[in-house]
Image: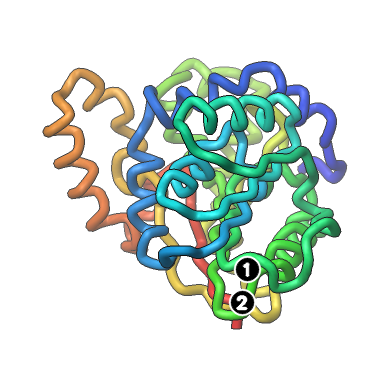
């Protein structure tokens, strides 16, 4: 397991191609955004201010800005910030976007945001210390009774990705540590598509329990049961796709199906 942060390497990875991440949610695998926003809408109230930490190219920031929310996006990647501003203009909406680090929110006051997204940084913080720091900072700037949305990449999600997209990796000696750790139901910080931390459901729960002042409201798979079937609906009509997306919503919080997803979200309320 990696014990050192790789901040610059991760920044360079995302600076290289902001459009790739935008297209991932827009074109290649829209179910993740569909499930996530439907679940978020249970908790986000009209007029809530939103701080989107690690907001990437701006998908979720722009989605909620278009609904009338005051949204601030913070991201490690300068190019993501520029891309998000450009996309907001194209969509005829306004967000505040700035470069920054999830582990240092000193520019934001205590109890200043109704809603905080932490959907990206926890994928790439290599050490437990930094992950806890990022969650504590997010909780600090969240108003009492506000909601914090934390996303994780699941360890078994990496297995799903390998089987679905890169089947030859099962034969590569350098990949065996990943497959072994996944089979042992453990978490791992390692070099993947970039430097990444992948977790188990139990380890994500345990991490959130370490943060005082937060109460877990729900945990759900952000692709629900559809992650293994990324390409199955590619050529289906919009009506068919959305019917399956709606059906998947019925499974996304069920414990038995959480590991069908690549991404896990923990929704917490600040006491």
Distance (Cα) linking label 2 and label 1: 8 Å
Give the secondary structure at mark 1. Answer: helix
Q: Relative to 93, does residue 40 appear above or below in the rendering?
A: below
Q: Residue at x 75, y 50 (%)?
A: 102
Q: Residue at x 79, y 43 (%)?
A: 100
Quarter of the view holding residue 130: bottom right
The residue where tag 2 is placed is 214
Q: Position of residue 184 (x, y in %)?
A: 56, 50
> Considering only order in the chain, which callout, 1 or 2, is on the residue closer to the N terminus?
1
Nearer the camera: disc 2 or disc 1:
2
In screen coordinates, is 188 left or right of 261? right
- Residue nearer the viewer, 117 or 260: 117
Q: Relative to 195, does residue 184 appear above or below in the rendering?
A: below
The residue where tag 1 is placed is 208
Q: Relative to 60, does residue 132 appear above or below in the rendering?
A: below
Label 2: how many residues lie within 10 Å, few (<14), some (14-19) or many (20+)?
Answer: many
In screen coordinates, is 235 left or right of 23? left
Q: Residue at x 33, y 29 (%)?
A: 230
Q: Residue at x 71, y 22 (%)?
A: 15
In screen coordinates, is 240 left or right of 74? left
Q: Position of residue 253 (x, y in %)?
A: 34, 62
Q: Are marks 2 and 1 in contact (CB under 8 Å)?
A: yes
Q: Position of residue 261 (x, y in %)?
A: 40, 45
Quarter of the view holding residue 114: bottom right
Label 1: how many residues lie within 10 Å, few (<14), some (14-19) or many (20+)?
Answer: many
- Residue nearer the viewer, 247 or 170: 247
């Amino acid at each position: 397991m990696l014990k050192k942060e790789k901040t610059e390497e991760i920044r360079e990875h995302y600076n290289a191609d902001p459009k790739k991440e935008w297209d991932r949610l827009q074109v290649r695998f829209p179910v993740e955004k569909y499930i996530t926003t439907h679940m978020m809408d249970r908790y986000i109230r009209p007029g809530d201010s939103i701080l989107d930490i690690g907001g990437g190219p701006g998908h979720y920031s722009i989605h909620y800005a278009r609904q009338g929310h005051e949204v601030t996006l913070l991201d490690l990647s300068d190019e993501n910030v520029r891309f998000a501003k450009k996309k907001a203009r194209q969509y005829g909406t306004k967000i505040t976007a700035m470069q920054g680090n999830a582990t240092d929110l000193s520019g934001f006051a205590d109890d200043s945001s109704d809603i905080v997204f932490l959907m990206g940084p926890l994928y790439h913080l290599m050490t437990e210390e930094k992950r806890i720091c990022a969650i504590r900072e997010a909780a600090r700037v969240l108003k009492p009774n506000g909601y914090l949305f934390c996303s994780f990449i699941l360890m078994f999600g990496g297995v799903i990705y390998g089987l679905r997209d890169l089947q030859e990796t099962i034969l590569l000696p350098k990949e065996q540590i990943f497959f072994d750790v996944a089979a042992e139901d453990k978490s791992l910080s390692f070099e993947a598509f970039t430097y990444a931390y992948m977790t188990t459901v139990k380890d994500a729960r345990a991490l959130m329990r370490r943060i005082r002042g937060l109460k877990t409201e729900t945990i759900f798979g952000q692709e629900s049961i559809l992650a293994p079937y990324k390409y199955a609906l590619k050529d289906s009509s919009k009506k068919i796709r959305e019917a399956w997306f709606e059906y998947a919503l019925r499974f996304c919080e069920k414990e038995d199906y959480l590991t069908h997803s690549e991404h896990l979200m923990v929704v917490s309320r600040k006491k």
